[in-house]
Image (spheres, coloured by chain):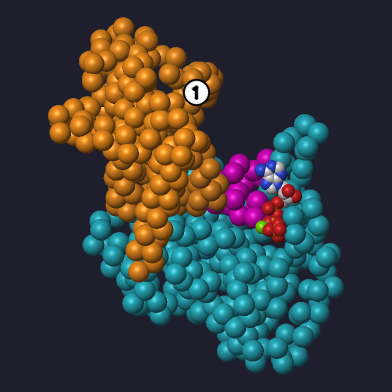
Amino acid sequence: MLNFRVLLSQIGLAVVLLGLWEYLTAIGYLSASLYGVPSGIATRAWEMMLSGELWQHTWVTTVEAVIGFAIGSAMGSFVGLALWLHEPTARCLRPFIVAINGVPKIAFAPLIIVWFGIGMEAKIAIAAILTFIVSLITTYNGTLETDKDLLKLMRSLGASRVQTWLKVVVPAGTPWMLSALRLNVGFALIGAVVGEYISSQEGLGYVVYYSGVLYDLNGVWVGIFALMVVALLMDYLVTLFERMVRW
Amino acid sequence: MVTTNAPLRTENLSVVFNPDTETEVTAFRDISFELKSEEILAIVGPSGCGKSTLFNVIAGLQPATTGQVEVKNRQVADATGHVGYMLQKDMLLPWRTVIDNVCLGLEVQGLAKSVRRARAQELISAFGLAGFEQAKPGTLSGGMRQRVAFMRTLALDPDVILLDEPFSALDFQTRTLLQLEVMKIISEQKKSAVLVTHDIGEAVTMADRVLVLSRRPGTIKNLVEIDLSREDRDPVKLRKNDKFQYYFQALWEQLEL
Ligand SMILES: Nc1ncnc2c1ncn2[C@@H]1O[C@H](COP(=O)(O)OP(=O)(O)OP(=O)(O)O)[C@@H](O)[C@H]1O
Ligand SMILES: [Mg+2]
């Protein structure tokens, strides 16, 4: 019941905002050629759906983002958790991780396109690197937050480091791992879209970029809205995963 | 060292934190005592006099600066797992069910699942928590959580049990009930226990002897025998007992609060 009311007000909000936008354009307050206009966006989206290109582009970007997300998040979470097992290694790697994290990782994109070419692999790689770093750092910091008394308890029971890791550190780090996944939905899409900006013939990043070059603002909006839908979908998948692993 | 059948003995133990620095702290000094078989020895002393640190050393979690610890006539160096240690907080794993929390130590020791389950189930029933096996700690009351922590400690069947203020966070009724239960189990299962407490009444009620520590750096001020029979030790009736009043008063005067 409550959920239904929330959904209704969300739809209401979207309708009001779009309606206001349409109205302000109709009375000449906003320029359609500068900002786009909802009716124009809808028309453009309809055309792109009929021709099948909207599906094609959305599919490409989704595949890139989801695969990059999965590879980066899985590896980042695992390495972040595993670093706890060997403190000297973690301490040795820390400045490198901090340095890489400090750089806007998008700066690596041109390198990756040189290495992986202009196909989907490059976009997957960019998304994977972004999400890898976020997962790694968040999860590793999470393991450092493990309650000292829990570690003490495990030692008093005679547990080895690996046992303590499996039975305490990993489960205690799970909420951190999950919060990184949520952030990574955004980062994976950034990775895919930026890769497509730089060099691509397909994907929503390409749609947005190319429409922008042609001053087709409605086309830009179609790309943005499609990206929002993909983001919501991925976020929902994370929610499903969260329900599976959360304690 | 003379060999006796004391399950636990310490000799000239002392712990200095951060030695030779500005933040040097001597937690305690020259602590020598012997825990007798099947007794409860209470340790009372002002906050910060090193009681938890003493337990950490006995449990092998932290090295002593000087002195040594013997458990069942074997010197404890780096080893852990030779005593049951119930920490000041219950430290249940929130993602595990009650029964899985009780099984934690047994898992660490690599016992087969069926053996673990059977042992845990036995304890859970003995403590009146049957039906709560699959509950998560977050849904339990403070007293139930403390029982689970105690069961987890007992599951490994240690001869020596260290209890660090196990009841301090509980309300009066729950505490009284648990004191009784723990006394009963310790005597039934023929365990020996060291009990750290701030509560002099609890020390008199539960302990056969009470070790009084001074303010930090903790040293042994006194060792008081509590001459009360098991039958006398009902936490409520005991309060009207003259002997209880006497011991309470005597310990109170020695504590440097
Ligand atoms: N790792 C540490 N480094 C430095 N000082 C420490 C450390 N651990 C404990 N101390 C100090 O040692 C002293 C004894 O601490 P401990 O926790 O053993 O006291 P306690 O008697 O258990 O106190 P309470 O009754 O409040 O639980 C305290 O002054 C504390 O600040
Ligand atoms: Mg303490």
Which corner quadrant holds the N terminus of chain A? bottom left
Q: Looking at this view, is B20 or B192 the one in front?
A: B20
Place residue B120 in its image quadrant: bottom left
Instruction: Reply yes or no: does residue A147 show up in magenta.
Output: no
Q: Looking at this view, is B21 or B58 the one in front?
A: B21
- Residues in magenta? B51-69
Q: Residue at x 72, y 41 (%)?
A: B16
Q: Residue at x 53, y 54 (%)?
A: B71
Residue A67 place in picture, x, y as percent: 25, 30
Q: Is residue A209 visible?
A: no
* Figure check: A95 above or below B3: above
Residue B199 place in picture, x, y as percent: 70, 72
Residue A239 place in picture, x, y as percent: 33, 49
User: Residue placed farthest to the top in the image?
Assistant: A114
Q: Relative to B151, is A238 on the left or the right?
A: left
* Figure check: A144 above or below A243: above
Residue hosting label 1: A101
Which corner quadrant holds the C terminus of chain A? bottom left
User: Residue placed farthest to the left in the image?
Assistant: A51
Q: Looking at this view, is A60 or B255 the one in front?
A: A60
Instruction: Reply yes or no: does residue B53 show up in magenta.
Output: yes
What is the drawing colour of chain B? cyan
Q: Chain of mark 1?
A: A
| Amino acid at pointer 1 | Asn
Q: Is residue B55 visible?
A: yes
**Chain orange in the figure, letter:** A
